[in-house]
Amino acid sequence: MIGSADVERLRAQLRLYFVMGSVNCAGDPFEAAAKAIESGVTMFQFREKGTGSLEGEAKLRLAGRLRALCRAKGVPFLVNDDVELALAVEADGVHVGQDDESVASVRRRIGGKLLGVSVHTMEEARRAAADGADYFGIGPIYPTSTKADAKPAAGTALIERLRAEGWTTPVVGIGGIDASNAGDVIRAGADGVAVITAISRADSIERSARELLRAVASAQPAGRFGE
């Protein structure tokens, strides 16, 4: 797990978290990622899943190119679920869901790299924290069609409860978020928002990323955790 001195840096890195794989883009996925990162994305997750997704060497090549892009721009690069791939391309971390490899197992395998965990209940949050999660991904906040097996939208209740009970674990909200509602997620207590199609399928990737960043910045309160 990261040390306490790095938690504030992680909060800042979570402000605009772009999650993407080749199937999420209408065109070249590398070009989409490059445009988003140039426009201010603060963290990137390679999530290559779904019908038509790349496998084997093709998946490894794209991951390597995206990893190099993120490294050149100083943006943390995480891999969804696939620990072997993350280690192969020297990713900065891994994000897992409740149906993926256990958090404790992933933590043992990746050492001190970043570890994000999707949580939907207080019990899942407690278990993830105990097993080594550095941040929580909470959602879907709003209805989303990106994941065929997505749980029903739950709003911001879990984020609000975590903050009300004094949890300071970094949190990013995901699911159906765009510039029109990102501020509500931040005001509920999230440190940032994670998006897929709000950027990858936008008419203008650059404009969408900038609008999301403005929405997050305008809603971010000072001194939330007493710093």
Image: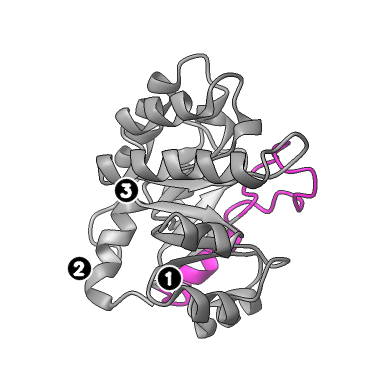
Mark 3 touching mark 2, by CB under 8 A?
no
The x, y position of residue 190, in whole percent, is: 44, 56
Determine which of the numbered discs, if any, sits on residue 134 in the image: 1
Where, by quadrant of the figure, is residue 212 drawn?
A: top left
Q: Nearer the viewer, residue 89 or 132?
A: 89
Whether residue 211 is visible to the viewer of this picture, yes or no, is: no
Residue under label 3: 220
Where, by quadrant of the figure, is residue 100 drawn?
A: bottom right
The x, y position of residue 160, in whole percent, is: 51, 62
Residue under label 2: 227
Most frequent secondary structure within the magenta stretch: loop
Q: Does residue 192 sit above or below 138 in this rendering?
A: above
Whether residue 142 is visible to the viewer of this picture, yes or no, is: yes
Q: Nearer the viewer, residue 131 or 72?
A: 72
Does residue 26 show up magenta in the picture?
no
What kind of element bears circle 1?
loop
Task: Between label 2 and label 1, give the one nearer the viewer.
Answer: 1
The x, y position of residue 70, in whole percent, is: 34, 43
What kind of element bears circle 2?
loop
